[in-house]
Image: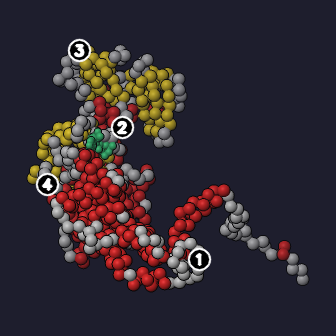
């Protein structure tokens, strides 16, 4: 695969804070690559390093296999869609979109034609003579997109481009952006702190925490097999357990949690008896039963329903297994198990999950 | 045939624009105070204008309408010469201080370097120092380096204080400037110089117009510093008027003041219009 952008051990320090910490990653040509993480984790800084607005303190940034550490932003074949759009208020929509083409000194007729094409691509035909402040937030967003895409850059950098839009418009734009990317075939590096957005749109996701790379992988990989507690916690909901290994029999690893539950996990060769482990289980991987079942032999634990949260298409049950251990169980509408309900707060229930749905975390 | 209104289906009630009851004009104490304030500000100016048309050599009693003083004014070569000097000085010092002040303010805003705070403080100093001190020190300076006092020395002196005012105004405008706009320009392929002329400057233009107007007015108005730095050959209008007043206030002075007033007024209206664009 062709690598468009590569970061090699990049560190960026401001006076006291380390915004990006020894970050290495590769972005392939044509992929939708997301940088995901909580506020202040260094997403914007990473993007600004690639765009050329910041110079790395350490490490190298490569675009097209060439080190660009000290190249100015206008010398790099990447374009940015800014978080606040950064449209030029003194120029019309058409002039905004033409700005980059004019810098390339293209002939007028070509500029006019390409601006018209770009406007059509983002469905803004007819608004070319408006000024940015005469547009709605969604329209401004499209202009920002058109202004960057019209230059046909090798890589498009997008910094939370949908952050300022309301939920409905955001969902629509997510789809549109994804379609647009297919259409133009440009590599997208997309910054977001919205895990759902990252999961639905990306080919690969880099999860950042405090400037460090926590995990890099496809959405399913990140969701199903989080490597660290941070990732398991940040993406979706997870139930966490802490315990000591008490057995490693055959296909199963046996862990005694701090609350005395004996939990079965898939076998892990590199773990020894007596070692401490963390693991997590997704709420939708657990199910509820009124009584103990002989079918689901392993991992059955009694508890009380402490809270029941109805969210339309699903119900969350907070079940306490002991004084300190509480778990969230999610039942989708129409799940087989949920028909056995209806449970209410205070009911005694059994929860269960398959050993292979436990994910051991590095920590 | 009965033709009572009830035979007709009643018309749907159209929502018609609500007409609010016209408020009875009543003058509150606030209006009185506002009126007094305006009177206090503009009465002296009004008197000056009125007496510029007075058919008497003394500014005390109204003796009838005349344009004599204006005719006299345009026959007075000294005043016309002074007006020319003032205009040239104001235009030149405005242009020079606008360029230097804008670039300095921009550099101060864009780049950080050692001793920036101190340098900034020093640049704002001319706003604080009394005119008289500046006037004297500038004269001393010119004399010391044996610079011929004249039009050039006045212009240099005016540039010296105007830079500070331009910087204050441009700085304020820069503070409100979105830094990402300059970054966006560079991202789209504009180098530093192009970015400055295509993005920074247009966004600053309302501030620049305001700064130019302020500088022009300050220069045109200035008496103290001009008085000290003017040479024999070049007398700006305020200094000229002062020397005339020493011999008694002639209505010619009223006439020239009225003209200056009208010019200022037109300038203010012009900028208002420009800035609203
Ligand atoms: N110019 C700067 N000077 C000093 N510190 C900075 C600068 N830019 C960023 N930082 C710091 O670096 C860290 C990472 O900032 P960054 O803007 O990259 O976060 P982010 O992941 O984009 O967050 P958000 O989701 O809130 O936009 C923060 O702690 C921030 O305070
Ligand atoms: Mg950010």
Helix, strand or loop for disc 3? loop
Which chain hosts label 1? B
Give the crowd class for mark 2: few <14, some 14-19, many >=20 residues within 10 Å. few
The residue drawn where x is 45% and y is 77% is B252
Query: Could you tell which of marks 3 and 2 lies nearer the N-terminus?
Result: 2
In this rendering, is residue A151 above or below A330? below
Are dots 3 and 4 in contact, CB under 8 Å?
A: no
Drawn side of residue B211 relative to residue A182, left or right: right
Q: Nearer the viewer, mark 4 or mark 2?
A: 4
The residue drawn where x is 49% and y is 34% is A309
Q: Which residue lies furthest to the left in this view?
A: A66
**Camera-nearest residue between A67 and B55:** B55
Which chain hosts label 2? A
What residue is disc 3 on? Answer: A274
In this rendering, is residue B60 above or below A206? below
Count of residue discs: 4
Which chain hosts label 4? A
Q: In whole angstroms, how far apart are the C-alphas of marks 3 and 1?
A: 112 Å
Q: In whole angstroms, how far apart are the C-alphas of marks 1 and 4?
A: 76 Å
Picture quadrant of residue A115:
bottom left
Tell me the number on the disc at residue A71.
Answer: 4
Helix, strand or loop for disc 1? loop
Same chain for the residues under marks 3 and 1 in the image: no
What residue is disc 2 on? Answer: A236
Picture quadrant of residue A9:
top left
Give the crowd class for mark 4: few <14, some 14-19, many >=20 residues within 10 Å. few
Are dots 3 and 1 in contact, CB under 8 Å?
A: no
Q: Where is residue A113 in the image (x, y as percent from the top left)?
A: 27, 74
The residue drawn where x is 14% and y is 41% is A58
Q: Which of marks 3 and 4 is in front?
A: 4
Query: Could you tell which of marks 3 and 4 lies nearer the N-terminus?
Result: 4
What residue is disc 1 on? Answer: B62
């Amino acid at each position: 695969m062709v690598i468009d952008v590569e970061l090699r051990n990049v560190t960026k320090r401001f006076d006291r804070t380390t915004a990006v910490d020894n970050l290495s990653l590769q972005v392939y040509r044509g992929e939708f690559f997301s940088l995901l993480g909580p506020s202040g984790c260094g997403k914007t800084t990473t993007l600004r390093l690639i765009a050329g607005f910041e110079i790395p303190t350490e490490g190298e940034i490569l675009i097209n296999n060439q080190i660009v550490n000290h190249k100015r932003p206008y010398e790099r074949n990447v374009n940015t869609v800014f978080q606040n759009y950064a449209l030029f208020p003194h120029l019309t929509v058409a002039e905004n979109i033409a700005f980059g083409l004019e810098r390339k000194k293209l002939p007028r007729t070509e500029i006019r034609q390409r601006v018209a094409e770009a406007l059509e691509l983002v469905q803004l035909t007819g608004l070319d003579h408006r000024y940015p402040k005469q547009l709605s937030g969604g329209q401004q967003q499209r202009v920002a997109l058109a202004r960057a895409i019209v230059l046909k850059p090798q890589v498009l950098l997008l910094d939370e481009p949908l952050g300022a839009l309301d939920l409905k418009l955001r969902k629509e734009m997510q789809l549109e952006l994804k379609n647009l990317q297919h259409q133009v075939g440009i590599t997208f590096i997309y910054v977001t702190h919205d895990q759902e957005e990252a999961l639905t749109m990306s080919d690969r996701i880099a999860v950042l925490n405090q400037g460090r790379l926590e995990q890099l992988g496809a959405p399913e990989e990140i969701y199903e097999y989080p490597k660290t507690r941070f990732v398991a916690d940040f993406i979706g909901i997870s139930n966490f357990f802490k315990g000591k290994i008490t057995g490693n029999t055959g296909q199963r690893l046996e862990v005694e949690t701090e609350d005395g539950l004996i939990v079965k996990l898939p076998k892990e060769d590199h773990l020894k008896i007596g070692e401490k482990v963390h693991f997590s289980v997704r709420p939708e991987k657990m199910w509820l039963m009124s009584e103990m079942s002989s079918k689901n032999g392993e991992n059955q634990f009694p508890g009380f329903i402490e809270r029941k949260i109805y969210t339309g298409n699903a119900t969350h049950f907070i079940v306490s297994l002991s004084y300190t251990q509480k778990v969230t169980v999610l039942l989708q509408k129409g799940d087989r198990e949920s028909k056995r309900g209806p449970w209410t707060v205070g009911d005694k229930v059994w929860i269960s999950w398959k050993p292979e749905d436990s994910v051991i975390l590095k920590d | 045939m009965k033709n009572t209104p009830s035979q007709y289906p009643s018309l749907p009630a159209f929502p018609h624009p609500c007409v609010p009851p016209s408020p009875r004009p009543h003058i509150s104490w606030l209006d009185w105070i506002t009126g007094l304030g305006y009177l206090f500000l503009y009465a002296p100016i009004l008197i000056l204008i009125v007496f510029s048309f007075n058919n008497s050599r003394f500014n005390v009693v109204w003796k009838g309408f005349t344009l004599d003083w204006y005719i006299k004014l345009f026959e007075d070569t000294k005043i016309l010469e002074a007006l020319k000097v003032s205009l040239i000085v104001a235009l030149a010092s405005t242009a020079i201080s606008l360029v230097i002040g804008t670039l300095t303010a921009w550099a101060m805003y864009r780049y950080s370097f050692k001793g920036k705070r101190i340098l900034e403080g020093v640049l704002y100093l001319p706003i604080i120092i009394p005119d008289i001190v500046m006037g004297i020190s500038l004269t001393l300076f010119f004399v010391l380096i044996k610079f011929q006092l004249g039009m050039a020395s006045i212009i240099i002196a005016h540039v010296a204080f105007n830079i500070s005012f331009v910087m204050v105004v441009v700085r304020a405008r820069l503070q409100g400037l979105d830094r990402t706009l300059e970054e966006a320009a560079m991202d789209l392929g504009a180098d530093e110089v192009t970015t400055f002329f295509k993005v920074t400057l247009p966004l600053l233009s309302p501030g620049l117009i305001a700064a130019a107007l302020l500088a022009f007015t300050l220069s045109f108005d200035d008496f103290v510093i001009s008085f000290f730095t003017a040479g024999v050959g070049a007398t700006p209008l305020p200094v000229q008027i002062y020397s005339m007043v020493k011999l008694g206030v002639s209505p010619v002075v009223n006439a020239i003041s009225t003209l200056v007033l009208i010019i200022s007024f037109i300038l203010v209206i012009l900028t208002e219009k420009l800035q609203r664009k």
